[in-house]
Image (cartoon, rainbow, N blue to C red):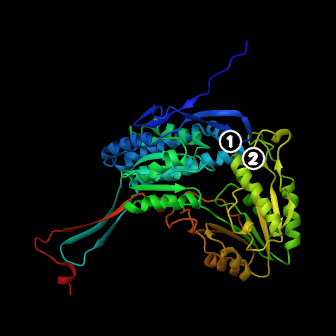
Amino acid sequence: MATSVAPRVFKNFINGEWVESRSGKAYENRNPANTDELVGMFVSSTSEDVDAAVDAAKEAYKKWRLVPAPKRAEILFRAAELLVQRKEEYSKDMTREMGKVLAETRGDVQEAIDMTYYMAGEGRRLFGQTTPSELPNKFAMSVRQSIGVCGMITPWNFPMAIPSWKMTPALISGNTVVLKPAEDTPLSSYHLVQVLAEAGIPPGVVNIVSGDGPGAGAPLAASEDVPVVSFTGSTAVGRLIAQACAPTFKHCSLEMGGKNIIVVMDDANLDLAVDGAVWGGFGTTGQRCTAASRVAVHKSIYHEFVSRFVDRVKALRVGNGLDSATDMGPCINEQQLKTVMDYVEIGKNEGAKLLTGGNRLDSGIHLKGWFHAPTIFGDCSPQMRIAQEEIFGPVVSVIPIDSFEQGIEVANGVPYGLSASIYTRNVNQAFAATRDLYTGIVYVNAPTIGAETHLPFGGTKQTGNGHREAAIAAIDFFSEWKTIYIDYSDKLQRAQIDNN
């Protein structure tokens, strides 16, 4: 007789315990490559659940901020060791819930490992400054201080890496955390929280509440007991987060959209540039804030580049990311697939030349997933919507340019400023590009994706609000400077008044 097994329901983690949501409801997490596969059920959190998590984090902060930073670091180091042990298991789970190919999810978990090790190392390097005073018998220095409860709202495309970018610098700085992961990919964030708990994070220091933006994300951003909010996602939602944070002047870090470009000059290594355009445009199905959704190519090599680029993209194998033969997985959900299809129609109507793709894949191995063919538009104008707006899918616009100067102008002529790349063998042009491209990240002879954990990550204009993720820049966001003066002169010294 056939039997059915009830799906596992993942609960919230609040104050060191896995607890049900006050709503009593749960939602499905399904595999975007095969929607018949139920990855798990996750509780639908409400403002009450968020309040409980925030209360736990606020109480835990009283003791956690006093734990010596090197001791906090030991916990992070143990967590990194656990991630190493479970890398393959967690990578496969991530492919099942997010869709990107296994090689990429291994990279996602590795990024969490790298970030956790890095921030563990910072436990002995939370340096301030000491400086001579302008007055005698007076000592001057600065130190970092923790802030409090940090609310974190993370996206679905890097469901373990990005939470690690936010959580580990917050924790090493002495803060406590409430994480609201993307509703499409909560399992990978749960795995990260699980290893932190196993590594010895005290109850209440790390909490996770699952659910959607209105139900859980908005109350977290608005909570009066959350002085720090870190968000990665769309510019539209980021604007709402900023508005929620503004009345009480919360620390607010926004990492949002991108419309990134690869500029290919006439002296470029063409094979290398094509490799970069394929990986930059179609890695993670184009669902990266750093995806190279525009390629500006010098007219003298335009036709040769486009011919090679199209041939390579036509050969990409689209399917289930757990299949080692797959090059590109599905879109994350039906809505994202619809967005991609809508932009394909916009591109056609704008007069762009459809060179390959342009259609949903919905038969055979693609029947039960959210698949779209990798798509290239040629002969694009820089002002076309498909060359201006973030699509977040496997669609690349190729733009012909006359010169280096025009390439820089086209690159900077969008509302975003996250990442840019130039392929050239001219060292002068390469250095000029690193100076003149107004983005947070610039690559030379490499695509627009490939950030490393020990350097700042983030962008300009509508990509962000000036803060950076990763490296020391993240610690700058998750800590406050405190300047300390110690006067041992045993008399009143009035700084500049007495120093003239």
Q: Quadrant of residue 34?
A: top right
Assess disc 2: are there few (<14), some (14-19) or many (≥20) residues with their C-alpha within 10 Å of its C-alpha.
Answer: many
Looking at the rendered structure, the secondary structure element under dot 2 is loop
Determine which residue is flagged by label 1.
Answer: 95
In the picture, measured across the screen, residue 252 lies left or right of residue 416, that is left
Q: Kindly identify the residue that appears in the image at 38 percent across and 49 percent down.
A: 70
Quadrant assignment for the N terminus:
top right
Determine which residue is flagged by label 2.
Answer: 329
Q: Kindly identify the residue that appears in the image at 75 percent across and 45 percent down.
A: 370
Amino acid type of disc 1? Thr
Amino acid type of disc 2? Gly
Looking at the rendered structure, the secondary structure element under dot 1 is helix
Residue 338 position in % (x across, y down): 73, 52
In the picture, measured across the screen, residue 66 lies left or right of residue 351, that is left
* Residue 143 appears in the picture as rendered: yes
- CB of mark 1 within 8 Å of CB of mark 2? yes
Residue 76 position in % (x across, y down): 46, 45
